[in-house]
Amino acid sequence: MDWLTAVQWSPYAAGIGIGILSWFTWLISSKPIGCSTSFARTAGMIEKLFRGKKVEGKLYYREVKPEIDWQWMFVLGIIGGALVSSLLSGDFGWQWIPGKWEMAFGNNMWLRFFAALSGGTLLGFGARWAGGCTSGHGISGTMQLAVSSWVSAICFFIGGIAMAHIIFNVIA
Amino acid sequence: MKAQTKKIQLVWGLLLGIIFGFLLQKSGVTKYDVIIGQLLLTDFTVLKVMLSAVVTGMLGLHLMQNLGWIKLRPKAGSWGKNAVGGLIFGLGFAILGYCPGTIAGAMGNGYLDAITGGFIGIVLGSGLLAAVYPSLNAGILKKGYFGDLTLPRFARVNEWIVIIPLSIVLTLLLFWLETAGL
């Protein structure tokens, strides 16, 4: 059972596994693998805590209901699956500053916190603008040959590659 | 009965998500360094995982659809929606170093930048989009609308005329990455 305790698998083995998993999400649940809608539902549920039922009347939340659905549980499962995998391999560890970030910007926790916060805000805004993320468009949509998803996935990487080069080769 | 079916589906979501999280963590893409390495074009793990998933999934899903087992639902889109939203996503992707799926994996891996700032940010950004959605929806999201078009319908060919060559090209690309030592 060495494969369960291995720190890292071949990316092809993991990728083929994800491809096969997508057959089963469709067969069992008639759902594509996806993640970002659940963050929008979470935002709506939090807003509902403060503003009550009227949040459900907002145009966006009429289309994306602020409730726990299949995909929300799927995203919760990702946390659990990654936890199990990293505990089995001993790769689990509390870590504030990733290695490449530390090499470029040092180990100031607050700098990394605010970068993650602002990057996350742009990412969440962009994902819901585009109607999907690296999973929903990048994997599930491209395999369905959707033009919307191929355009999105290519733009994710154009924007990402450009910004990463600015961060690490211009700013740092 | 219907309420029970729904509850069972929630359990399936959780179970299938656990497998996805396990695979993401084992592939290495729950790590900031791996994702930034991809965006800096020094580590191609992310592309290798994604393309092998896409080829495997594409062959299986279209076969299952031909057999009448499933009905695929390609998402509708437009240039204003997918190109503009995709570029905004990309900027955030590089600053955060995780995406919505891999950040859930990073949270399970114990990464505190993901658990705190990253997670809060994605929820906040999603909520902000919901707030401005009515005006976007009346304008830019409809610019260059092409609907739920697929590549085979765009090319007016049978889907397998796209699937087979695309699978070969993507597989050759992966072989080329390996021989180039990337």
Image (cartoon, coloured by chain):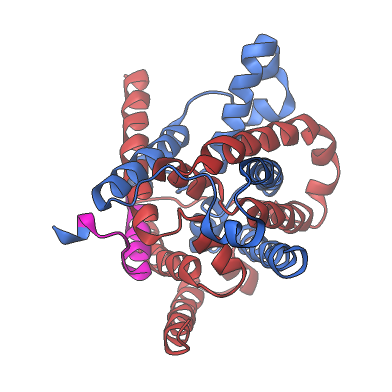
Q: Going 53% across and 23% down the picture, which residue do you hit?
A: A67
Which quadrant of the rendered structure holds the C terminus of chain A? bottom right
Give the quadrant of residue B145: bottom right
Q: Does the magenta stretch include residue A9?
A: yes
Give the quadrant of residue B174: bottom left
Q: Going 37% across and 26% down the picture, which residue do you hit?
A: B6
Give the quadrant of residue B80: bottom right
Q: Which chain comes out blue in the rendered image?
A: A
| SS assignment for the magenta stretch, majority | helix
Q: What stretch is highlighted in magenta?
A: A4-24
Q: Is residue B180 above or below residue B154?
A: below
Q: Residue furthest bottom?
A: B179
Q: Going 45% across and 71% down the picture, which residue do you hit?
A: B48
Q: Nearer the viewer, residue A79 or A23?
A: A79
Which shade of the palette goes to chain B?
Answer: red
Which quadrant of the rendered structure holds the N terminus of chain A? bottom left
Q: Position of residue A13 (x, y in %)?
A: 31, 67
